[in-house]
Amino acid sequence: MGPVTQYSAVHLIPEAKVDPAKWSRIPSEQVVVHTVQNIEKRGITVIRTENAAEALAVLKNLIPPRAEVMNGSSTTLIEIGYEALLQSGEMAWVDQHGIITAASDDIQRAELRRKSVSADYFLSGVNAIAGTGELVSCDRTGSRVGAWPYAAGHLILVSGINKIVPTLPDALQRVREYAYPLEDARAKRAYGVGSRIGKCVILANEEIERRIFLILINDSLGY
C-alpha cells in the first residue's frame, strides 16, 4: 500500500461499505504489461514507476518551469506528494488552483475554474483502467474531467495498478461500486455534502502524440 493520508481509502472503506478485495487488487505483472500495451496502442504514453516518490519525480520532470498547471481533486495526487510540492513553491509553475482559491468572489472563481481546464498541464487521478486500454474517470460537476478530452495542452494522469480491471464494462462498474461510494464518503467529510456520478469521460483514443501521459505506479494508491 502507498502512503496513507487523511482521505485515503483505508479510512473511508467502513463508511462507504465497499469491497477492496474485489475492486482494489494488485494484478499480475503479465496483466499490467498487457494493459500498458493496450493503453499505448490508443495513443497514450505510459510511464511505469515503482512507488509514489518515483512517480512524483517523474511528474516533476514532465512539467517544465513556468508552465501553467491545474489539477482536479485527487487522492492519488495527494498520496504521491503533489499537493505538498505545489504548496511548497519549490517548482516554478503557475499554479492555477492557487489563483482560483485566491479569487475575491464566487463568480470570479467559477470563471477562472472554467478557463483552467485549458491549462498547459492538467493533472488528475483515474477511477478505473480497463485491461483493454480505456481510462475512465467520473465526477459530480465535470471540473475534474473537463480537461481530459481536448481542452488541456497536456494531460498527466497518475494511478496505482490497483485500478486495473479486465474490461471497459468492469471499469464502469468499478466506478459505481467502489470509486463513487468512497468519493461520496470523502466529500461528506471534507465538504459536508455528498457526491454523485454526474459527468464521466472514457479515454479510448488520443490523436495528439504525447499529449496524454499515464504515470502508472506499481502499488495500491487512491480509489
Image (spheres, rainbow, N blue to C red):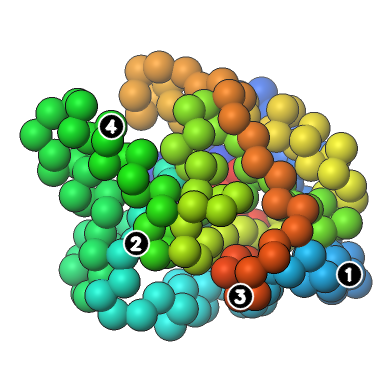
Of helix, strand and loop, which one carries label 3? loop
Where is mark 1, residue-wise? Answer: 34
Where is mark 2, residue-wise? Answer: 69
Do the residues under discs 1 and 2 have CB atoms within 8 angstroms?
no
Left or right, residue 131 beside residue 5 = right
Mark 2, Cα crowd under 10 Å, few <14 / some 14-19 / many 20+, is many
Q: Which mark is residue 210?
A: 3
In percent of width and height, residue 118 lies at 41, 53
Q: CA distance from mark 4 to mark 1?
A: 41 Å
Of the pair 177 and 2, the residue shown nearer to us: 177
Q: Is residue 180 above or below residue 89?
A: above
Left or right, residue 201 beside residue 131 = left
Q: CA distance from mark 2 to mark 4?
A: 17 Å
The residue shown at (59%, 30%) is 199
Q: Label 3 sits on what residue type?
A: Arg
Q: Label 4 sits on what residue type?
A: Ala
Q: Is residue 126 above or below residue 54?
A: above
Q: Earlier in the sequence, mark 4 or mark 3?
A: 4
The residue shown at (79%, 65%) is 42
Q: Earlier in the sequence, mark 1 or mark 3?
A: 1
Mark 3, Cα crowd under 10 Å, few <14 / some 14-19 / many 20+, is few
Do the residues under discs 2 and 3 have CB atoms within 8 angstroms?
no
Where is mark 4, residue-wise? Answer: 110
